[in-house]
Image (spheres, coloured by chain):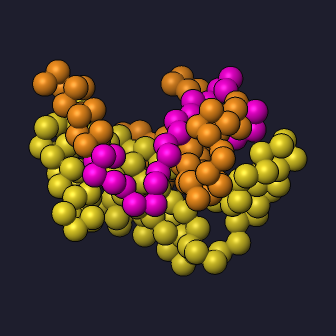
Chain colours: A orange, B yellow
Amino acid sequence: MRRYEVYVTGKPGIFDPAGKTTAGALDNLGYSGVERVRIGKFLQLECDDAISLEQVTEMCEKLLANPIIEDYRIECTPENPSRADAQAVFRGVLENNGE
Amino acid sequence: MRRYEVYVTGKPGIFDPAGKTTAGALDNLGYSGVERVRIGKFLQLECDDAISLEQVTEMCEKLLANPIIEDYRIECTPENPSRADAQAVFRGVLENNGE
C-alpha cells in the first residue's frame, strides 16, 4: 500500500475568489492580521505498490489538476517514515541552506 | 510575515462523494491500482507575526473547517527552514521509530 498526497493550488496571479472571501470573513471576525488566504485542494490517494510517481503525475495532468491555471505538488508518504527518509529530509534542508 | 498551512479533511467514515467520483474516473482512465481517493481543502494563510497558532486554531473551529464532520491540521512554515527546524524533524522521526 502506497499513499500519495497531491496539493493543488492556483498559479500565482490567478484570482482566487474563495480565498478572497475567506480573508474578508476572517477580518470581520476580528483577525485583522491575516493578509492573504489561498485555497487549494488536498488529495490523498491510496494505491497499490504498482502505481508510480510518474503515473500520479500523469493523473494530475489529465484529471486531478487543471495545468493551465493550477500548480500541483506530489508527495509519497510511506506509512511509517524510516530513518533513511528522516536523513534525506535532514540533508535536503542543510543543502538548501548551503551547509 | 508568517505562513500557516491548514489541511482540512473529512473525518473517517464521512462519505466523500467527490473522492469517490474521482476514484471512479481514474479507474476509467486505466489506473486500476488506485483504491481510494479522499479530497480535502488546503489553505495557505499569510499573516503578520502577531497571529499565533492558537488564533489559527480558533479560525479553524469558527470558519475554516466544520469540526463536526472535518478534521484539520495546521503547519507553520517559516520562509526558509533553519538548521534547528531540520534537526527537530530528524529527532521527531527517530523518536517515532523508538530510536
Residue at (17%, 51%) from the top-left corner?
B88
Viewer-side residue, A28 vs A93:
A93
Farthest-out residue, right: B28
Nearer the observer, B33 or A39:
B33
Taking the spot 76% from the left edge, 33% from the top edge, the residue there is A62
Number of numbered discs on residues:
0
Measuring from the top left, give residue B59's x and y in whole percent.
39, 62
Residue A66 visible in this rendered orientation of the protein: no
Q: Position of residue A63 (x, y in %)?
A: 75, 38
Of the 4 image quadrants, the one containing the C terminus of chain B is: bottom left
Displayed quadrant of residue A6: top right
Quadrant for the N terminus of chain B in the image = top left
The residue lying at 76 percent from left, 54 percent from top is B23
Query: Does the segment drawn in magenta span residue A72?
Result: yes
Residue B7 versus residue B31 in the image, above or below: below
Whether residue B55 is in magenta: the answer is no
For the record, the magenta segment spans A62-86
Horizontal side of residue B30 vs B91, given as left or right: right
Q: Position of residue A76 (x, y in %)?
A: 50, 46
**Above-or-below relation of A42 to A12:** below
- Could you tell me residue A60's position as x and y percent? 67, 36
Residue lying at 27% horizontally and 32% vertically, measured from the top left: A92
